Amino acid sequence: MEAPDRLTPVLWFERAVVATLVNSADDDRRRTQIEEYVDGALRAMPEYLRAGVASESLLLGAWPRLEAALGRDDPQALRARLERWKASRFDVVRQYVRLLQSLVLFAENELESDPA
């Protein structure tokens, strides 16, 4: 019997971070393709890596989730938060943003070369 795969789906905070990191000049179709590409890359991660990324997403996304629940959801606040995290003195926080930003950049370049 196979164990349930609970960490596979991309979490809401990961989607929000990816949406923030995607180039704002991209059209909706391309943004969707990039988000799907990052989703696929995260799903392809070994479980032990995915568990770490998901744990960070849950921890780092707790405050933005609370703000959203209180009606103070601001995309610019998330963008500013990500900029602060890029310079964080905590390696795991910097690496979290770097991972998702790398996946977005890779997706943008990979999709650019597709003839579709």
Image (tube, grey):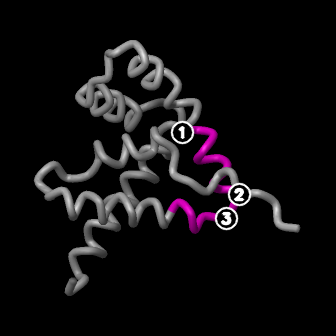
Give the residue pinned by disc 2: 5
Q: Main secondary structure of the magenta part?
A: helix
Which mark is first along the chain, 2 or 3?
2
State the extent of the magenta-drawn residues as a range.
42-56
Task: Tell me how far mark 1 sits from mark 3, CA to CA.
Answer: 16 Å
Task: Tell me how far mark 3 sits from mark 2, CA to CA.
Answer: 11 Å
Give the residue pinned by disc 3: 46
Does the magenta run of residues contain 45? yes
- Residue at x 58%, y 47% (from the top left corner): 53
Horizontal side of 18 relative to 8 (left or right) equals left
Note whether 43 is above or below 113 in the view shown.
above
Residue type at tag 2? Asp
Q: Secondary structure at mark 3?
A: loop
- Residue at x 54%, y 39% (from the top left corner): 57
Q: Secondary structure at mark 1?
A: helix
The answer to whether mark 1 and mark 2 are in CB contact below 8 A is no
Q: Nearer the viewer, residue 68 or 88?
A: 68
**Neighbourhood count class around disc 3 (C-alpha, 10 Å): few under 14, some 14–19, many 20 upward:** few
Residue 65: x and y in percent read 46, 25
